Amino acid sequence: MKNTMRFQKIGGSRQLVLDKAENLEQIPVLDEALWAVTAMPVDSVIMDKEFLTFLDADGNGRIRPEELKNAIQWLIGVLSDYSGIDNASDTLRLSALNPDHPDSEMLRASALLALGNLGVEDKTQISLAQVRDKKSIIAAGNNNGDGIITPANTENPAIAQCITDIINCCGSKQDLSGEPGIDESILDTFIKEGSAHLEWLKTGREDDNNSPYGDKAADFYALYATIREKINEFYTFCGGLVDDATDPRFGTVQKVDPLNIDEMENFIRKAPVAMPSASGLLSVEKWMNPLWKNKILDFLSMAKELNVIESEELLTEPEWRNIEKSFVVRSGWDARKNNDKFDSLDLPTLETCLSEETIAALREMITADLSVAKEIAACDLLKKLILYQQNMLRFTNNFICLSDLFNPQTLSVIQPGRLIVDGRYFTLLANVSNLPEHKKIIARSNICVMYLELNTGKGADAKKMTMAAAVTSGSMRNIFIGKTGVFMTGDGIEWDAKVIDLIQQPVSFSEALQMPFFKLGEFAGKQADKFFSTKSKNVETDITKQVTDAANQKTPQQPPAQTPAVSGSMMLMGGGVGLAALGSSFAFIANTLKNVSFWNVVGVFVGIALIISAPVLLVSLFKLWTRCVSDFFAAGGWAINPKMRLSRKMGLLFTYKPAMPQSILLRQDLVKVFAKRFAPANNNLRNGLLTLLLLLLGILAGYLVYLKFIAV
């Protein structure tokens, strides 16, 4: 190692400092028990997916120590210059490769091949974007390592045409460039089957040379072979007739509905080429099957040209049998044909494609293509190296140590985004796949957690997920199930967020102090609501009963009593009664408290408050002190070694209100400005008189208390 290990306190635990690439050399020798994390789910890390795939060597969806150590050892071994790691560069300088490493030569060759195929002039470095453009790398080069050659792989038009002919005869395989081509197996099939077909063609040429039809033999046989079965069928039908005029079986033509398409097609398909006759004459002047008429006319025309029939309008059975005999050898040769693959190639073309020079050229092209297979395959290894160089230092600062997690300047790779709810940011978040299981584990952390349902997109692009958000500072008083907010990922995508569940725990010391009184107030409010609801219901029931009873009684209706007018004397009498009641109340209070000291009263109230709040307060303070960030991540499937307590200062990093920008504060409340429009026009005098009356009543009550209890 080039330097001594350094540790720093993070969340109350000592963790390795990884601020430069040289520190990566310390990781393989550092005991895993001293790592911050020993395993994490791949899908909980917000980084390049291909980088994470390379790290997860066994593909089980989790990254573990052995996988990370192997990746780091390979990275620092294959590079002799770590500056690219320090700069998190996505460009690899070829001079940074360690010439003593066994993979160095292959990586360099792969980079040069890729740069050459892409037409890049600067051959000293290669970027991640260039390596990822594998399709262009393959398409731009004549060779791509898959052993498949296409017509585009050669500048020789004859060889290119030969490859096309082989594809047409024996099929193709798709080249990495996306074009159809041939490989060694297709070429071998072409040689084997094509050679057999070539020999067959040569035999047919010899037969043609001995044929009475000369150079017309092949064409005449082709016409003959087309109509042979139907003509033989015709003469078979003719042989079954006795007399054209008297045979009842063929006395009339079958009646067919010409407007019925299916019936007509079925008749024509099954009908003979012409109307059979006992004389065995096939005459073109009588009815002929339209499916075969033109073919027969072509045959008769060539037969007349070759002097094998007397007339183009008539074919006798003896003439037909003579033609059949002339093609006995040719028919035997035709029966020996293996397949129709090579029908598109004539004998000279097939001879050219199967020549030693052509086959040697094709094999040489396939060998040349395969020769770069290692370099092309190494493109993935090259991509792996550049991704490691770009991301390894950042990843280890979220695995070996968790320093990035507590940096408020940016989100770490284990923080999926920022949640905005209740005018605050929440950044300690985790994806949740199993809500009940997550809640069981998260309860150990003593952290207040809200679960949210997130949605984004619409239609086929709609996405949905569940997120757990830790509330680490402030208060929970304004967060409730159903409250909505916005979640923003690091790449700027916005999600609608809605609170669907809560794990309520104390969030701050001030909330812990207030919690007993809030709970007491809630309890008192519920009891008061219950009491008054019951009383109101009882009164409503009594009134209903009385009205019902009165309606059922048939007594003469009494005239309603007249409500007396309110007079000044009645008001004075009512005020006197009220003042007397107030005086009695004040007297009782004064009489009770005159022998009790002020501090005793204060002590009683403090004692009552302590009795009510002390247990709740102590439990809340204990939970605040034992809040654990490690357990929050453990609920998401992480294996974390240190037990990091969520302190008050740490809580401010994960839940906070943004600072107000530099601004000018307008003191006047806009609500008051607009409310002036709706205030009553002349209420000042009335409000003043009511205030004066209340003041006089208070003075009078105080004077009466003085006369009765103090002046005596």
Image (cartoon, rainbow, N blue to C red):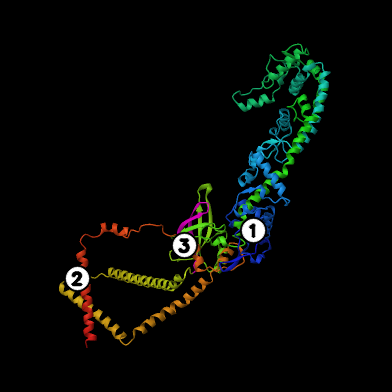
Q: Secondary structure at mark 2?
A: loop
Instruction: Point out the frontmost of discs 3 and 1.
Output: 1
Q: Residue at x 67, y 44 (%)?
A: 111
Find the distance from the CA under tag 2 to the CA under tag 1.
102 Å
Q: Magenta stretch: give its range.
A: 481-505
Image height check: is 290 above or below 593? above
Label 3: element kind? strand
- Rate crowding at label 3 as few (under 14), some (14 to 19) or many (20 or more) other CA atoms within 10 Å: some
Picture quadrant of residue 140: top right
**What is the three-letter code of the residue carrying label 1?**
Glu
Answer yes or no: is residue 568 visible: yes
Q: What's the mark number on residue 238?
A: none
Q: Which residue is mark 3?
A: 656
Q: Which mark is residue 22?
A: 1
- Could you tell whether 205 is left or right of 689 in the image? right
Whether 495 is among the magenta residues is yes
Q: Residues within 10 Å of mark 1 (few under 14, many from 20)?
A: some
Nearest to viewer (mark 2 / mark 3):
3
Location of residue 350 with respect to 174 vertically, above or below = above
Q: Position of residue 63 (x, y in %)?
A: 64, 58
Give amino acid for label 2.
Answer: Ala
Foreground residue among 453 and 534: 453
The first of marks 2 and 1 along the sequence is 1
413 vs 569, left or right, is: right
Q: Amino acid at mark 3?
A: Tyr
**Is-magenta flag for residue 395?**
no
In the image, residue 109 sits, relative to residue 468, either above or below, namely above
Label 1, secondary structure: give it: helix
Q: Which mark is residue 561?
A: 2
Q: How far apart, in angstroms, are the residues tagged by discs 3 and 1?
A: 35 Å
